[in-house]
Amino acid sequence: MHALPRDIRRTVIGRVTAAVVVVVAGAVAGCGRPQADYSRVELVEVTGRVTLDGSPLAEATVVFRDPAGSFSWAVTDAEGRYRLKFDSVKEGVTPGRKTVLISSQPLSEEGFESADEKIPARYNRDSNLSVEVLNTAATHDFALTSD
């Protein structure tokens, strides 16, 4: 086996050392983060399936939004199935009446991008979908149509 030239060896060792420092620093910084207290938030498991014209709708963003503006969200899998998330850590949605928005675009702080939307506006920007989330786990399927 041939040894690496000294300058390359220094570069590799330097990069490995820098990577270890970054990983350790990130781990230490993460230890001090406050943990969310979910004990006062009632969350209900909601799953379902979304189809468009009878076919599974993959990689669609599903949002359940309450009248006050808070929401839970999910992205559908290849079979159009989703499981709502309350945030990046906890799954579920709070009980109550929800407006449902379904989009082919990712959700951002401004809402959905509309330029390349493949799903009719009546399911997202001008949504007419709504559900009542009860205090027990539920399945809500959505059969969307293009026309």
Image (cartoon, rainbow, N blue to C red):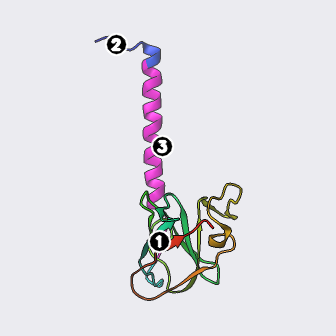
Element type where label 3 sits in the image: helix
Q: Quadrant of the C terminus?
A: bottom right
User: Horizontal and vertical percent for residue 101?
Assistant: 60, 72
145 inside magenta stretch = no
Magenta span of residues: 9-37
Residue bearing the label numbered 3? 22
Toward the viewer: 55 or 73?
A: 55
The residue at the point 65 percent across, 75 percent down is 127
Label 2 vs label 1, nearer the camera: 1
User: Horizontal and vertical percent for residue 97?
Assistant: 56, 87
Distance from the alpha carbon under mark 2 to that under mark 3: 27 Å
- Asked whether, in this view, residue 120 is left or right of residue 96, the answer is right
User: Horizontal and vertical percent for residue 106?
Assistant: 60, 59
Q: Earlier in the sequence, mark 2 or mark 3?
A: 2
Type of amino acid at the residue the image marks with label 3: Val
The secondary structure making up most of the magenta span is helix
Relative to 142, residue 66 above or below: below
Element type where label 2 sits in the image: loop
- Asked whether, in this view, residue 115 is left or right of residue 3, the answer is right
Most extreme residue toward the left, as rendered? 1
Type of amino acid at the residue the image marks with label 1: Leu
Q: Earlier in the sequence, mark 2 or mark 1?
A: 2
Residue bearing the label numbered 2? 3
Total labels: the figure holds: 3
The reply to whether dot 1 and dot 3 touch (C-beta < 8 Å) is no
Residue bearing the label numbered 1? 84
Type of amino acid at the residue the image marks with label 2: Ala
Q: Earlier in the sequence, mark 1 or mark 3?
A: 3
User: Horizontal and vertical percent for residue 46?
Assistant: 43, 77
